[in-house]
Amino acid sequence: MSIPVAQGVIAADAPDAERAAFIRKTYAHLGGAILLFVVLEWALIHSPLAQPMISTMLGGRLSWAIVLGAFMGASWVADRWARNAQSVAMQYAGLALYVVAETVIFLPLLYIAAFLMHDPNLIPTAGLITGLVFAGLTASVFLTGSDFSWMRQALTVGGLAALGLIAASLLFGFTLGTLFAAAMVVLASGYILYYTSNVLHHYPIGSHVAAALALFSAVALLFWYILRILMSRRR
């Protein structure tokens, strides 16, 4: 996901008041996206649509590959909409689309964790760990003022490698285990550092919706693999 291109002052060069307002708006929108995700996921997982959707999504390796492809396509569209500097409505549509896409792709994992693992603390524990990791990484960037934009190439390579392994697992039918999940936690943590430093140093003022979407994508990735690790330890 790229840094949005907009005709505006970069946050690092903006007056302190405008920079602070931009940061507040970014994290307020991130909180709103997380809240919307929780509400939509709860409604979907308790709806009559849940089991038919899960059966379709997990109908086979090809079915899940189609789901992942659709998610990647929706993510790309959502990112472009959120980076639209001319239309605020389009920016919000992009963020909403991305939250909905995450809600759908999380459905099978959260359904299994909620109803088949027989541990009511599983999802809350994963959420708490995700929140603590995110808070720690965010604090480290804000307190040090570090610029992690140098991580972009490494994160891109890591992301492509992960996609390659996921595609291979679907094609050849092998399982990606706990070691892969742990590596993805590291990758997601890297994305949080990268996007947080972009909020401080590189996003233009006014691009808080796109910045919130980027942070939300990293938080969702982190939560997914922390939950996967916890689920593997319960089996």
Image (cartoon, rainbow, N blue to C red):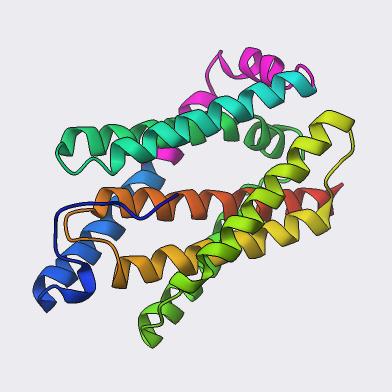
Question: Residue 127: where, in percent of width, then height?
Answer: 56, 55
Q: Is residue 50 magenta?
A: yes
Q: Picture quarter containing residue 115?
A: top right
Magenta highlight: main SS: helix
Question: Residue 78: where, in percent of width, then height?
Answer: 38, 35
In the image, residue 209 sits, relative to residue 204, either above or below, namely above
Q: In the visual, does 210 lie left or right of 169? A: left
Question: Residue 1: where, in percent of width, then height?
Answer: 45, 49
Q: In the visual, does 191 lie left or right of 12? A: right
Q: What residue is drawn where x is 30% and y is 35%?
A: 81
Q: Give, as a single range, the part of the protein colored magenta.
A: 36-60
Q: In the visual, does 116 lie left or right of 6? A: right
In the image, residue 7 sits, relative to residue 62, either above or below, namely below
Closest to the observer: 26 or 171? 171
Query: Is residue 46 in view from this perspective?
Result: yes
Outermost residue on the bottom side: it is: 144
Q: What residue is drawn where x is 57% and y is 56%?
A: 156
Q: What residue is drawn where x is 34% and y is 38%?
A: 80
Q: In the visual, does 159 lie left or right of 73? A: right
Q: Picture quarter containing residue 195?
A: bottom left
Closest to the observer: 182 or 39? 182
Q: Picture quarter containing residue 87?
A: top left
Query: Is residue 125 in view from this perspective?
Result: no
Q: What residue is drawn where x is 62% and y is 30%?
A: 68
In the image, residue 104 sits, relative to residue 205, either above or below, namely above
Numbered label tally: 0
Question: Residue 101: where, in percent of width, then height?
Answer: 48, 31
In the image, residue 130 sits, relative to residue 176, either above or below, namely below
Q: Is residue 52 magenta?
A: yes
Closest to the observer: 111 or 9? 9
